Amino acid sequence: MLSSVKQAGVASASPPVNPNGRWFPPPSVRDLLRAGKRRRRLAPYLLLLPSAAAIGLLLVWPAIQLVVYSFQDYGLPQVTGAAPTSWTGFANFRLVLSDPEFWSSLRISVLFALAAVPLTLAAGTLVGLLLNRLGRKMAAFVSTTALLAWAMPAVSASVIFVWLFDPDGGVVDWLLTKLPSWLGGGPRWSGFSWTNAPLPAYTVITLLVVWQGFPFIAVSVLAGLKTIPAELHEAARVDGAGAWRVFWRVTYPLLKPIFLVLLLLSVIWDFGIFTQAYIVTGELGNRDEFNLGILAYDKAFTMPPAYGVASALGVVLTVVLLVITAGYVRANVRQGAVR
């Protein structure tokens, strides 16, 4: 019995053996530490993997399909399988660039972005500066109220603005008729249609986009203001600087990277805006009011649908936004705003 116990003890104390019958030494402390470090390095990527997979499924794969369709003759017959898909090279792009409606829509998109983006940034910055001066409770109340406009779905907000500017009993026309003539009011506003021409229609859309977009700008600016030491503003005021000089010489240089990001996001959001323009202009009623978003929708979903041409238009819109973004970022890198 004693020999059997010794044999069992020897067997339990013997080094581990692999399936080939060859023993290998136990891992050292250094090996365990290295394995733990490798696991810690992989842990963030493993946690990001589900989100990356969802982004790839919802954004990257459709973008790849968009580029593929832009080089194909792809329409309803190809979707149903009644006709084979054929590659057309750059024919869709030539068709888009030779279409007068494309250039008209591009002009409207550019003019709209030039109006809406600065107004949104200015309104959001002013509200952010106001929130920074308010007390904690009042700032929380104002920011929460403003964020309700930002969180409202674009369809709901657009329908509300259509009701407000309705020529048949809308509140805006009624208020304008009540204003005195020296303020621009009068009976001429009675029954005024805001969707019969691009200028009044995009005036409404600009107000809608600014109303929905300024809360995000305001909260972002407020977050940046909280990172600036109060001593810098106090020193500037002691030196006799006014409010505008304090903002331009102290606040803006420190928040310039934040303003860069907000500007790029605003350009991307407003340049190819679709939902608000589609609802306010009355869907596809007036082709003179088409921007690039509505034109792409018209090419893709009116009969007969031309998915290839619409995809080419989407690629052109993406390239335009990339050029604007790259140019602006490069200019700010040269100025030292971004490192």
Image (tube, helix red, strand yellow):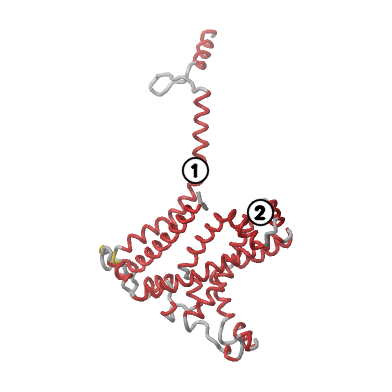
Residue 46: which disc?
A: 1
Q: Is residue 108 left or right of residue 142?
A: left
- Residue 231 position, x and y percent, is 70, 51
Q: Nearer the viewer, residue 238 or 59?
A: 238
Identify the residue shown where x is 65% and y is 59%. 246
Q: Residues within 10 Å of mark 2 (few under 14, many from 20)?
A: few
Question: Would you place residue 288 above or below residue 339 in this image?
Answer: below
Question: Would you place residue 137 above or below residue 157 in this image?
Answer: above
Q: Quadrant of residue 253?
A: bottom right
Question: Would you place residue 12 above or below residue 317 in this image?
Answer: above
What is the three-letter code of the residue carrying label 1? Leu
Q: CA distance from mark 2 to mark 1?
A: 33 Å
Identify the residue shown where x is 32% and y is 69%. 75
Q: Is residue 119 left or right of residue 92?
A: right
In the image, farthest residue toward the top: 2
- Residue 229 position, x and y percent, is 67, 50
Q: Is residue 5 left or right of residue 21?
A: right
Residue 226: which disc?
A: 2
